Image (cartoon, rainbow, N blue to C red):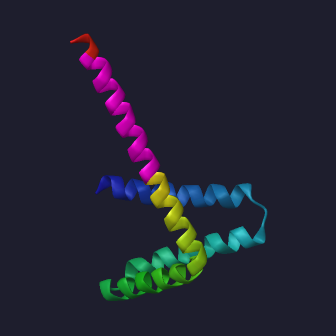
Amino acid sequence: MAEVRKKAVDDKNDLEKLVKKTKSKKVKKEVAIKKQEKSTMSKKSLLDRFRAFCHGVKGEFHKVHWPSKENMLKYSIATIFFIIFCACFFYLIDVIFAFIKSLFN
């Protein structure tokens, strides 16, 4: 419990240091919004926080750059060939070491 309180205090101090270091109004505004969100989030119920989390996940999901079908096919083929190459390489290394070991026995 003490670590949680300490982390909250450290986070608050970090935000204040960031505001002091930066002169940008945009950063100061973002920090103020984050402070307000933290205070309102602690007052919300579990269901409201879960909804906010899901809304954030949905927003981040829309930011993801999805590859086209052609690119996905190219990447998949390249990955399969790389796996086959690595498997053959390590198989050959294993065979060579087994052969060397059999010479000395």
Q: Residue at x 37, y 58 (%)?
A: 5
Give left or right: position of 23 versus 48: right
Q: Is residue 65 visible?
A: no
The location of residue 84, given as percent across then percent down, is: 42, 52
Above or below, comparing residue 69 to residue 12 in the picture: below
Viewer-closest of 78 and 17: 78
Viewer-closest of 62 and 73: 73
Give left or right: position of 56 versus 74: left
As drawn, the residue found furthest toward the left would be 105
Quadrant assignment, res 25? bottom right
The location of residue 63, given as percent across then percent down, is: 59, 79
Q: Residue at x 53, y 60 (%)?
A: 78
Count of marks overlaid on the render: 0
Instruction: Say which quadrant the C terminus sits in.
Output: top left
Residues drawn in magenta: 84-102
Viewer-closest of 46 and 61: 61
Q: Is residue 86 visible?
A: yes
Above or below, comparing residue 64 to residue 75 in the picture: below
Above or below, comparing residue 30 to residue 99 in the picture: below
Q: Residue at x 55, y 56 (%)?
A: 13
Q: Is residue 61 magenta?
A: no
Q: Is residue 99 magenta?
A: yes
Q: Residue at x 54, y 78 (%)?
A: 36
Viewer-closest of 18 and 50: 50
Give left or right: position of 21 versus 70: right
Instruction: Say which quadrant the N terminus sits in.
Output: bottom left
Q: Main secondary structure of the magenta part?
A: helix
The location of residue 65, given as percent across then percent down, is: 60, 76
Give left or right: position of 54 versus 12: left
